Image: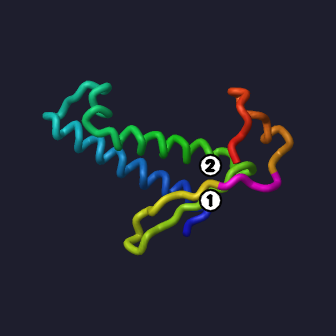
């Protein structure tokens, strides 16, 4: 398990793997593709790109969030566990912007 100190390296590795997969998809289509078609051809890339953005955002607020990276035996990243710190800053516990109650 890699804690917040190593999460930046893990995100960079994920971004590099994502970039390689995107390049592979573009090459598969002859070296050029319309940007809006990439996610039609490979929906998994949209999810992975969103995951990387989420992790990068959360690591900007280490006083609020803890992100733990889990590795499988081969050294590949197996997933991430997100936690809110119990000692949140006073302004961090604001109600959701949609007005709905938070889910338990």
Q: State whether the magenta stretch is mostly helix, strand or loop.
A: loop
**Direction from residue 76 to residue 4 in the image, left or right:** right
> Quick one: 83 or 77, which is closer to the camera?
83
SS for tag 2?
A: helix
At a point 32% along the width and 33% down the height, the residue shown is 39
Which corner quadrant holds the N terminus?
A: bottom right
How far across and down, in percent of the image, does residue 52 sit? 48, 45
Question: Which numbered marker is on residue 46?
Answer: none
- Residue in the image at 80% along x and 49% along y: 88
User: Which stretch is magenta?
Assistant: 83-87
Determine which quarter of the picture holds residue 23: top left
* First of labels 1, 2 by sequence position: 1
**Residue 12: x %, y % from top left:** 46, 52
Q: What is the number of the mark on residue 59?
A: 2
Color encoding of the figure: rainbow
In the rendered structure, does residue 78 fall within the stretch colored magenta? no
The x and y percentages for residue 8 are 54, 54
Q: Classify residue 102 as left or right of residue 36.
A: right
Would residue 84 be counted in the magenta stretch?
yes
User: Tags 1 and 2 in contact by the CB under 8 Å rule?
Assistant: yes
- Dot 1 alpha-carbon crowd within 10 angstroms: few under 14, some 14 to 19, many 20 or more: some
Which residue is label 1 attached to? Answer: 4
Q: Marks 1 and 2, how far apart in space? A: 7 Å
Is 25 on the left-hand or right-hand side of 56? left
- Total marks shown come to 2
Q: Nearer the viewer, residue 101 or 21?
A: 101
């Amino acid at each position: 398990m890699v804690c917040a100190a190593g999460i930046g390296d893990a995100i960079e590795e994920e971004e590099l793997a994502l970039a390689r997969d995107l390049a592979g998809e573009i090459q598969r289509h002859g070296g050029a593709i319309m940007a809006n078609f990439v996610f039609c051809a490979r929906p998994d890339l949209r999810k992975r790109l969103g995951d990387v953005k989420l992790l990068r955002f959360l690591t900007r607020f280490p006083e609020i969030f803890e992100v733990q990276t889990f590795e499988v035996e081969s050294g590949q990243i197996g997933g991430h566990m997100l936690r809110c710190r119990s000692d949140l800053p006073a302004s961090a516990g604001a109600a959701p912007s949609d007005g709905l109650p938070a889910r338990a």
